[in-house]
Amino acid sequence: MISKADPKFWHLYDALPLSVRAAARRAFKRFQADPGHPSLNFKPLKGDADFVSVRISLKYRAVGRRKGEVVAWFWIGSHGDFDREFS
């Protein structure tokens, strides 16, 4: 699977605490090696299978749009922000 990230993602990423950015890097490496790894909880969002989410940590997620084998990541943030943004 190929991952890309848009400028909005990087803006949100840069605003995260250092510990969350480190967790995001670890999750990305795991995703590159095995997108189906259970700890990532990689899954489509309810209502639109083109949009997917992946667990960064217990409190953070990332969201992207999937087209075939490419995921374009456009959002990263806390679960609370995720619920407000995508529910």
Image: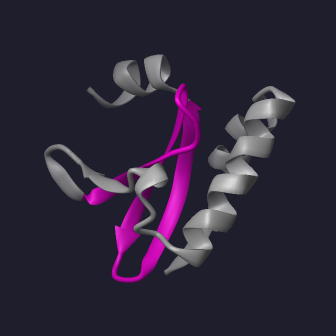
Q: Residue furthest left?
A: 47
Residue 11 shows in the view:
no
Q: Residue 25 falls in which quadrant of the image?
A: bottom right
**Vertical side of 15 occupied by 72: above or below:** below
Per the rendered image, the range of residues in magenta is 50-77
What residue is at 69 percent from the left and 36 percent from the top?
12
Q: Residue furthest right?
A: 18
Q: Residue furthest front?
A: 38
Q: Is residue 41 rendered magenta in the image?
A: no
**Vertical side of 46 occupied by 52: above or below:** below
Q: Position of residue 10 (x, y in %)?
A: 73, 47
Residue 33 shows in the view:
yes
Q: Could you tell me which quadrant the C terminus lies in?
A: top left
Q: Count every numbered label the image shows and give the total.
A: 0
**Which SS does the magenta portion mostly show?**
strand
Task: Describe residue 16's horizontal placement relative to residue 28 as left or right.
Answer: right
Q: Position of residue 50 (x, y in %)?
A: 27, 62
65 and 18: which is toward the camera: 18
What residue is at 36 percent from the left and 22 percent from the top?
83
**Vertical side of 73 occupied by 47: above or below:** above
What residue is at 80 percent from the left and 26 percent from the top?
17
What residue is at 77 percent from the left and 40 percent from the top?
21
Q: Position of residue 3 (x, y in %)?
A: 58, 72
Q: Position of residue 30 (x, y in %)?
A: 61, 65
Color encoding of the figure: one colour
61 and 37: which is toward the camera: 37
**Vertical side of 76 occupied by 29: above or below:** below
Task: Describe residue 28's horizontal placement relative to residue 31 as left or right.
Answer: right
